Each structure stands twice: as structure tokens, then as C-alpha cells.
């Protein structure tokens, strides 16, 4: 039986409501010892998931708060254990004293992620669902939140469960072949397994392919803003982030060093780098800045090449065009649309698939830029949750896939059953790691260490 853990589940800030939670066999007993329902009944008389109004006492019996308490009994709770939650007024002091009161009655401080770890260990969720909890908490775009919620609902689990069951089927059949060589084992069914494995292979490949988009969702995209001096790169950065992050002046060569800032555009988390204006210069400091600018473009997945629409195309602009070619994706941003236009946009259009006129000064044209960024990173047409965002999941799927590939090859080349069996078992073990069925204790520990205390 597990000991009873307690933690403040909400942030250490003054807020309307703050929550202290308990999980473990003695939760309801410990909660009852410091909480007295206003009705005069005992807390333990109430059914699960009922909000009970009452008085909360400190360790030495003083009134701490008039608050709500709710209990859930094992196994029908988040952790699968007896749990209690106090919904207090959101004073960090009240919450701390409530926690101390619970410690004085036998609870201990919960470790990071310990509630969710217990939910996983008690079979309330698989490992992909447990990891989705932290992804949901940390999600910083609506797409990431939607996908994490889908995974919390078991989207990855459902995609791989059927494959897991089919592999078990194949393995048991091959064991029969190996263990009872004299028996007549149905050879016809063994042939049919090639089809099963091909189907599994297709499904795992689709899942793995989603990881490209998942990485964008989880970690964002490096994007460099490049262009000639005075094109308005720093002004564009400021317009996108919504405040005066970078120094802007009418002096060409204002930005010397690279400058980074995160922002969500078109639902995509961009890690923007503002850079020094590209031009030929004798100034060694500026030269270093320009080298860094080119380096930023090369290291980026997206380049926003900024041109001054009020000026004619110059040789310096061709440096921006060259820099844009170093990235996988690029957008030409024709800035200063508020001024009379002189730029030959036709010449720009021949080097860029997407051209967006904007005015960083007036902050106009930015919605089109939002749409342009979104169009470069389309979402696959899959239900929420079926985009892999976690490299641990991608790695497990990749290993399962390569083992299935080997098994298919072995089957096709009529290899001995033990070869097929070994590969199928490897695929099974990789999928077991994904769901947590066969995951090592140290891996589990590392996963839950990422969580916050109280979750
Ligand atoms: N009219 C107009 N002026 C702009 C616009 N965007 C920037 N500017 C002006 O252009 C000048 C240069 O802007 P910056 O944002 O510093 O240009 P930059 O590309 O970062 O320049 P460097 O750092 O020198 O490479 C400033 O005087 C800005 O106010 C715009 O959309 N319209
Ligand atoms: Mg600048």
C-alpha cells in the first residue's frame, strides 16, 4: 500500500482559488482530521466527487479557511487511490499552512509528477497519456494543446494497441511452430501475417511521419529575419512581438549582434532572430554581425527576407535573396507599404514563392504574414492527438518499424521461424516501451521528473 502524498496543485501566486491535493490510502482519514463540514456530517459520509463546504484547520487547530473539499475513493480517482482535494481561497500562506497541517497528520510532500506517476502505475493511464498531461500543461499554442488533449484521451495508445495485439498473435503462433515442430501448424495463416505486418508498417510509418510536424508543434521553428540595412528588420521583429524589443533608428547598420525572441505567428511558435543588415562593409564589428546574420539564416528553418518597398532593388538585396536560399522555407516581406512603392516586386517574386507586403511601422499586412507562416507548416489531416510530439515516442515507433521491416523480409525470404520471432519480439518490446508496458524504471523516473510538484 502506498503512503499518502500531499502537494499544492496550483501556482505560488495570489489567486481566487488554490488547490491542495492528497493521494494515498489514508487521504480521506487525514483530510477528515483537519476539515469539518458545515453540515455537521463527517467528510467520509459524503459520496465521491461532491463538493463539501466546511472549515479547514491548521496543524494546531486554528481556523485556516472556509473552503470546499472533495474526495474520490480508489480505484475511481485520478491516481487510482483514495484522494482528497481542498479548494481554498488562493492565498499562498493559507495553502502552505494547509499543507503543513496535512504533514502533521501523516502525509508527506509529493515529488514532482508523483500523482500522475501513481495514475500510470495503477493502470489509470498509459505512459503516452501520462506524458500528455505535462505536454498539455506546457502547451503554448492552441494546436499543441489540442494535440496533447487528444493524446491524453489515448490517441497514440489506440493507434498502436491493435498492432501490439497482432504482434502478440504472431509471436504466439511462431512459438507454437518452434515449440511443437512435429505438430501441423497452420502454414496458411503464417502467410497471412505478411499482410498484417505490412498494414502495421503503414500505420507506424504514418505515425512517424507526423513527428516532423510534431517537432514544430513542440519546439517551434527557428526563423531568421534578414535583409539589407534599414529595410525594417528590427521594426518587423518589434511589430511581431508586440513591443519595442530591438533598437530601431534611421541609421543603417543599427543592429550589430543577433537578437532572439519567441512569438507565435499563424499558430506556429517561431524563435525569431533579428540580424545585422547585409552589406559590404569595412567595419570589423559590422562584418562580424553580418557573419552571424548569415549563420542565423543557415541555422534556420525559415527565413523572413525583408525588403524596403520604398526603394529600388539594390545589390545588397541580392545578399538577402542568397541568405533566404540557405533555408528550407522562406517568405519575402516587402516592408514600408505605407510609403510610395519603387521596388520591382516581379524580381522578388521570381526568387520567393510567398511575398507579403507589410508596414512594420503601421503594423499592417501582418495577418497575411500569419497566414503565410501557417501555410508553410500545414497540419496533417489526422484526429487531434495523432501527431507525435515526443522524441521518446518517435524513437520507439522507429525501432518497432525497423523490426517489423526485418520481420517482413524474413517472412518473404522464408527464413526460419526464430528470425521472424526475434524481430516480432523486438517490435513488441518497442511498442511496449511506448505505452509503458515494458518500460524501464529509470526511464519512467526521468519522465516524471519533468513534471511540476502537485501534478
Ligand atoms: N515608413 C516606414 N518606415 C519604416 C517601416 N519599418 C521601418 N521603418 C523605418 O526604417 C528605419 C530602419 O528601421 P529598422 O527597423 O531599424 O531597420 P533594420 O532593417 O533593422 O536596420 P539595421 O538594423 O540597420 O540593419 C527606421 O527609421 C524605421 O522607423 C515601415 O513600415 N514604414
Ligand atoms: Mg535592425
Image: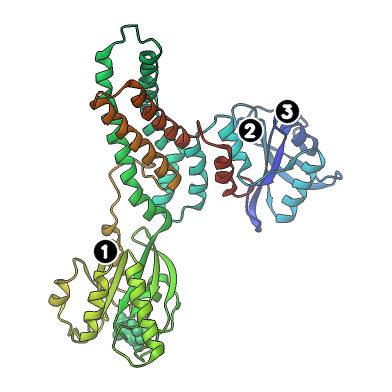
Q: Residue furthest top?
A: 183
Image position of 18 (left or right of 406): right
The residue at which mark 1 appears reads as 329
The residue at which mark 2 appears reads as 50
Residues at badges 3 and 2 in contact (C-beta under 8 Å)? no
The residue at which mark 3 appears reads as 44
Asked if one can make out residue 65 in the rendered structure from this viewpoint, the answer is no
Residues at badges 3 and 1 in contact (C-beta under 8 Å)? no
Tell which circle, 3 or 1, labels the residue nearer the N-terminal end: 3
Disc 2 is placed on an element classified as: loop
Q: Position of residue 327 (x, y in %)?
A: 28, 66
> Mark 3 to mark 1: distance in Å?
61 Å
The answer to which of 245 and 282 lies nearer the viewer is: 282
Rendered view: 206 above or below 162: below
Q: Position of residue 101 (x, y in %)?
A: 79, 44
Neighbours of disc 2 within 10 Å: few (<14), some (14-19), many (20+) = few
Asked if one can make out residue 255 in the rendered structure from this viewpoint, the answer is yes
Q: Mark 2 near ligand 1 (CB under 8 Å)?
A: no
Viewer-side label of 1, 2: 1
Amino acid at each position: 500500500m502506498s503512503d499518502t502524498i500531499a502537494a499544492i496543485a496550483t501556482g505560488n501566486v495570489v489567486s481566487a482559488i488554490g488547490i491542495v491535493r492528497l493521494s494515498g490510502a489514508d487521504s480521506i482519514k487525514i483530510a477528515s482530521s483537519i476539515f469539518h463540514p458545515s453540515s455537521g456530517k463527517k467528510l467520509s459520509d459524503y459520496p465521491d466527487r461532491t463538493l463539501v463546504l466546511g472549515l479547514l484547520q491548521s496543524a494546531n487547530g486554528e481556523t485556516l479557511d472556509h473552503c470546499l473539499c472533495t474526495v474520490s475513493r480508489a480505484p475511481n480517482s485520478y491516481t487510482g487511490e483514495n484522494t482528497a482535494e481542498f479548494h481554498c481561497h488562493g492565498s499562498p500562506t493559507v495553502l502552505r499552512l494547509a499543507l503543513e497541517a496535512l504533514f502533521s497528520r501523516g502525509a508527506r510532500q509529493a515529488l514532482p509528477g508523483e500523482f500522475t506517476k501513481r495514475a500510470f502505475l495503477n493502470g489509470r493511464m498509459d505512459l503516452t497519456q501520462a506524458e500528455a498531461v505535462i505536454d498539455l500543461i506546457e502547451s503554448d499554442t492552441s494546436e499543441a494543446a489540442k494535440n496533447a488533449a487528444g493524446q491524453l484521451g489515448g490517441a497514440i495508445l489506440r493507434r498502436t494497441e491493435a498492432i501490439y495485439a497482432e504482434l502478440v498473435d504472431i509471436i504466439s503462433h511462431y512459438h507454437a511452430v518452434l515449440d511443437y515442430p512435429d505438430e501441423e501448424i497452420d502454414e496458411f495463416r503464417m502467410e497471412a501475417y505478411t499482410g498484417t505486418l505490412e498494414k502495421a508498417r503503414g500505420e507506424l510509418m504514418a505515425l512517424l511521419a507526423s513527428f516532423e510536424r510534431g517537432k514544430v508543434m513542440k519546439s517551434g521553428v527557428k526563423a531568421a529575419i534578414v535583409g539589407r540595412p534599414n529595410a525594417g528588420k528590427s521594426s518587423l521583429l518589434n511589430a511581431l512581438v508586440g513591443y519595442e524589443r530591438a533598437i530601431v533608428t534611421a541609421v543603417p547598420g543599427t543592429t550589430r549582434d543577433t537578437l532572439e525572441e519567441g512569438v507565435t505567428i499563424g499558430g506556429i511558435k517561431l524563435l525569431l532572430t533579428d540580424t545585422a543588415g547585409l552589406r559590404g562593409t569595412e567595419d570589423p564589428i559590422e562584418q562580424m554581425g553580418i557573419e552571424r546574420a548569415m549563420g542565423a539564416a543557415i541555422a534556420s528553418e525559415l527565413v523572413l527576407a525583408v525588403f524596403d518597398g520604398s526603394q529600388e532593388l539594390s545589390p545588397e538585396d541580392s545578399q538577402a535573396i542568397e541568405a533566404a536560399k540557405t533555408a528550407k522555407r522562406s517568405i519575402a516581406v516587402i516592408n514600408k507599404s505605407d510609403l510610395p512603392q519603387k521596388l520591382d516586386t516581379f524580381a522578388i517574386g521570381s526568387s520567393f514563392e510567398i511575398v507579403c507586403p507589410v508596414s512594420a511601422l503601421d503594423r499592417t499586412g501582418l495577418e497575411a504574414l500569419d497566414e503565410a507562416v501557417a501555410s508553410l507548416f500545414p497540419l496533417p489531416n489526422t484526429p487531434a492527438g495523432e501527431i507525435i510530439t515526443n522524441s521518446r515516442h518517435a524513437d520507439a515507433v522507429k525501432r518497432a518499424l525497423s523490426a517489423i521491416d526485418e520481420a517482413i523480409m524474413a517472412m518473404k525470404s522464408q527464413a526460419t521461424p526464430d528470425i521472424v520471432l526475434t524481430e516480432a519480439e523486438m517490435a513488441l518490446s518497442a511498442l511496449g516501451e511506448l505505452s509503458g508496458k515494458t518500460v524501464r524504471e529509470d526511464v519512467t523516473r526521468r519522465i516524471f521528473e519533468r513534471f511540476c510538484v502537485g501534478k
